[in-house]
Image (cartoon, rainbow, N blue to C red):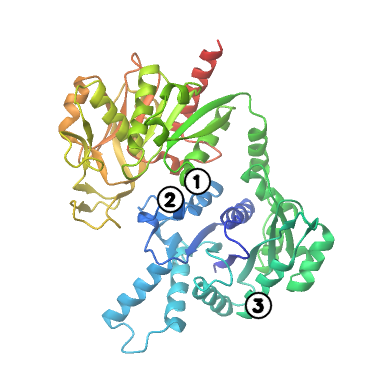
Amino acid sequence: MTKFVFVTGGVVSSLGKGIAAASLAALLESRGLKVTLIKLDPYLNVDPGTMSPMQHGEVFVTDDGAETDLDLGHYERFITTRMKKTNNFTTGQIYMSVLEKERRGDYLGKTVQVIPHVTNEIQDFVKRGAGYNSPDAVDVAIVEIGGTVGDIESLPFLEAVRQMSLRLGPNNAAFVHLTYVPWIAAAGELKTKPTQHTVQKMREIGIQPDALLCRADRPIPDDEREKISLFTNVAQWGVISMPDVDTIYKVPRVLHEQGLDGLICDKLRLNTPPANLKRWDDLVYETQHPQGVVRIAMVGKYVELSDSYKSVNEALRHAGMKNHVKSEITYVDSETLESGDVAAQLGQFDAILVPGGFGKRGVEGKIAAACYAREHGVPYLGICLGMQVATIEFARHVAGLTHANSTEFEPQTPHPVIALIDEWQDADGSIQKRDANSDLGGTMRLGAQSSDVAPGTLAHAIYGDVVTERHRHRYEANTQYLDRLRAAGLVISALTQREHLTEMVELPQDAHPWYVGVQFHPEFKSTPWDGHPLFNAFVKAGLTQHQSKKG
């Protein structure tokens, strides 16, 4: 039977519940257990697809086409289990499901209430994510509850998992609470009171944590851990210090050395071999002993919040490790390139990456970055919008299509080289149609889809005959302009198998050492163990560029 670990957070948000949950999952997986992770988000949006990155950070996309919380990216990078639509849900999805049932008459005229109807629905969603009582069932499901204990938003989730733990029985559920222990500089001491209060809030609603993960900017001394233990009714060995670390890949060992995985296995009556952390130790060693550096400019418009590009950042770091170098990422606000000296801002970098995004703001700056990379032979990787701006730039300055643009930014452009796609085949094989009047939410091309790769191209050297990657976009390269772009020298190196939509573009290698644009999002499939072939090749090209500058 599947056992559950519920991970909650207190005091403040952004403590790192996702990393903590993923690290615990990695520890349990290293003991030979089959593990999955589920994220519960307390907002009413049905998915994060139309939320600003400033509000939500990155939107992670799964193979089956779900737009999810960025923590699912951490989950996929830390364990081998792939995430699906069922691994993340919001309060909005719960209420939508309950109301649809009510409208159908499933409740047979009963008064529909938060308890039991909403809380039962939450439990059903959690069990579905874990494959409970199905052939896909896992040994342990780690359930991360978004929000902060004490907030009204997450109360239905907390009540639901309290009920669930009661129904499952004492050895089938465990609670791990992440809390913050601030250092007050003026007093010169750590303060445990916020932790005491947040655990008190949990106990008021009937939840007793089995372990406390205490975040602080320094290790927590034993006397403070003892104090926290006495005030929270958590055994001292369950009060675990989580100091700041310089790489997230150290967290599994930090937790293991304090016995968190052993505590959880004891609580859940799991008899397993000891944890094997060699791969994590090797990973940390690689991050700390680079043999060089590659300087990468990431030209975007959400640069003040790096969470907007979480998976891209990690993919570049993974590729750096595979090339035994440090990927040194500098964020360049694309709006500053629209009126400034592009060469002065980008001239010192070994490679340029333009990530995805929506909306007109900063687009001309991204086009300027693509132009600079093309004209100066700097390795360039354009992802989603990054491919589209590279196509627009080439159309304007090489193919002679003056004022070429995307209909997203200029609906009346004389040369719509990028336009709204109106039909495509979804990941499940169904045909999707839309037009300019379709709802924004839920109308993107999403999930894993395959494309044929042209032989003799850079794309073929990286991917082979077929590329299968995840998508998240509304606009595509206009098929009516492909012949004119090809005639001007742009290589269309990958096309979808059914619609022949552009998936990859590049410049011939006799014209540019490494210049690639992709419509999909390869960053979602990068792992610290293998990196990703596209990012590995990009960083390698940047390393070659760096060495040629030195030479």
Quick one: 541 or 414, which is closer to the camera?
414
Q: Quadrant of residue 247?
A: top right
Mark nearer the viewer, 3 or 1: 1
- Residue named by callout 2: 53
Q: Are marks 2 and 3 in contact (CB under 8 Å)?
A: no
Quote the CA–CA distance across marks 2 and 3.
34 Å
Residue 379 appears in view = no
For this orientation, the residue located farthest to the front is 339
Q: How many marks?
A: 3
Quote the CA–CA distance across marks 2 and 1.
8 Å
Residue 66: x %, y % from top left: 37, 55
Residue 449: x %, y % from top left: 31, 44
Give the SS element for disc 3.
helix
Please name the amino acid that badge 3 sits on: Arg
Mark nearer the viewer, 2 or 3: 2
Rendered position, 147 above or below 68? below
Q: Are marks 2 and 1 in contact (CB under 8 Å)?
A: yes
Other residues around mark 3 within 10 Å, as few (<14) / some (14–19) / many (≥20):
some
Quote the CA–CA distance across marks 3 and 1.
35 Å
x 33%, y 15%: residue: 511
Q: Are marks 3 and 1 in contact (CB under 8 Å)?
A: no
Give the SS element for disc 2.
helix
Quick one: 301 or 167, which is closer to the camera?
301
Give the number of the disc on residue 203.
3
Quick one: 263 or 30, which is closer to the camera?
263
Residue 465: x %, y % from top left: 32, 31
For marks 2 and 3 on the same chain, the one whose residue lies earlier in the sequence: 2
Relative to 506, is 18 on the left or the right?
right
Rendered position, 303 above or below 225? above
Please name the amino acid that badge 1 sits on: Leu
Give the number of the disc on residue 286.
none
- Residue named by callout 1: 305
